[in-house]
Amino acid sequence: MGGAVSAGEDNDDLIDNLKEAQYIRTEKVEQAFRAIDRGNYYLDGYRDSAYKDLAWKHGNIHLSAPCIYSEVMEALKLQPGLSFLNLGSGTGYLSTMVGLIIGPFGVNHGVELHKDVVEYAREKLDEFIKNSDSFDKFEFCEPVFVVGNCLEISTDSHQYDRIYCGAGVQKDHENYMKVLLKIGGILVMPIEDQLTQITRTGQCTWESKNILAVSFAPLVQQSRADGEKPDTVQLPPVTVRSLQDLSRIYIRRTLRNLANDGSQGKDTVQRVPQKRKRRRCRRRRINTYVFVGNQLIPQMVESEEEEHAEEEHKEVEEEEERDIGDIEILKQVNVLRHQIMALPLPESLKAYLLYYREK
C-alpha cells in the first residue's frame, strides 16, 4: 500500500511531498514527521527505499507507507497529555512521533506480537533519545512496549484517549477494540479494507468515518490447543512521575523557553526549510542534414534553448548546495545543551538533565 506521492531524496523531501499532496495538514504533525527520520527505522542496506511512499517489510519488521501514517496521525487529533495505545506497535516509529505531540504528561503504550520486533523498537527508541538532533527540541513521552497478542488484552485494563491498530481488524473484533477507548476518545483502525476513524460519543454510542481505502494484513489470532488458556497481555501501568523526573522536565522547559524568547526577532531557523525543487528542463534537439560528398547525412545539433536550460539547471544545483551547507551549520547548534552545560551544577546532574546524551 502506498505510492500516492513522489519519492523523496531524504526525510524532509518526503515530508514536503506529503504536505503538497495534503496527507499532512497540520503543523504539529509536520513537526513530528520532520523530527523522526524514517530512514533510521530501516535495516542497513535498505535505507535507499525509506523515502518512497511504500510499505516495507523484512522478516517480522514492518513499516506502513508514509501516506498511511500521515492520515493516521491527522485522524488521531493528538493533544498534549493524552493517553495513547498502539496495537501492533512494530518498530515504534509511529509511537515515537506520537510521543513528541502528547508530551511528558501523556501515556504512550504499545503492544507487539513479536519479541524480536519489540527489541528492535526499544533499540531504535534508545538511538533516538541518545543521538537525534530533534530530541532536545521537544518534550517527549517515551513509549513503553510489551510483547503479546493485542486480541488477548486483560479485561481489567485501563482505557485510552487515543488508539491505533496497525493490522486489519475483522468485524467481530470491532467491539473488543471499542471497549479499550475512553468516552470522547478516538480509535483509528483498518476495517474491511477501509482505514476508519471511530469516536466514542457516549457509554454505548459511536461515530464512524471512513478515511481512505487500505490493504492491511489481518490481526494474528492466537492458536489454542483444546483446553489451553491464552496468554493474557498485561498493559503497562500508568505511573506517576517522580519528583526528580518532574524537576528535569521543568528545568529543560524553562531553559528552552528562555532560548526561544532570546531568539525572537533574530533571523534563526527553527526547522530545516523545504528544499527548492529542481526544475526539470526539457531537452530539445534539432534535426539537420549535412552533405558529405554526394550523400545527405542527418545530424543532431543541440539548440541554444537546451544550452541555456543546462546552465540554469547547474545554477539551481549550486544554490541548493549552498543552502544545504548553511542548514548543516544551523543543525549543529544545540542551544539547550549549551545552557545546561553552563549551569553551576555537578557533572552527574548535568548528564541527567541531558538524558545522558553525548551530543
Image: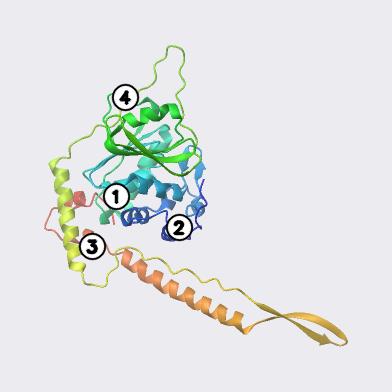
Q: Position of residue 347 (x, y in %)?
A: 17, 53
Q: Which residue is mark 2?
A: 21
Tag 4: Cα neighbours inside 10 Å, few (<14), some, or many (≥20)?
few
Q: Mark 3 and 4 residues: CB-CB less than 8 Å, in contact?
A: no
Which residue is nearer to you in this view: 263 or 125? 263
Q: Is residue 112 left or right of residue 182?
A: right
The one nearer the camera, 48 or 161, is 161
Q: Looking at the image, is mark 1 or mark 3 earlier in the sequence? A: 1
Which residue occupies 52% across, 79% down?
A: 312
Q: Amino acid at mark 4?
A: Ser
Query: Type of residue at label 1?
Result: Leu
Task: Kindly give the residue lying farthest to the left in the view shown.
Answer: 344
Q: Secondary structure at mark 3?
A: helix
Q: Residue at x 29, y 49 (%)?
A: 100
Q: Residue at x 19, y 58 (%)?
A: 256
Residue 339, given in percent of the width and then of the height, sits at: 18, 61
User: Observer-nearest residue: 38 or 15?
Assistant: 15
- Dot 1 surroundings within 10 Å: few (below 14), some, or many (20 or more)? many
Q: Any mark on residue 335, and which?
A: 3
Say how many tags the image has: 4
Kindly report the distance in space between the C-alpha atoms of the residues bearing marks 4 and 1.
Answer: 28 Å
Of the image marks 3 and 4, the number of the one nearer the N terminus: 4
Q: Amino acid at mark 3?
A: Val
Residue 261 drawn above or below residue 64: below
Query: Which circle, 3 or 4, is nearer the viewer?
Result: 4
| Residue 95 left/right relative to 14 | left
Decide: few, some or many residues near mark 3? Use Cα within 10 Å; few <14, some 14-19, many ≥20: some
Figure check: 56 above or below 278 = above
Which comes sooner in the sequence, label 2 or label 4? 2
Residue named by callout 4: 154
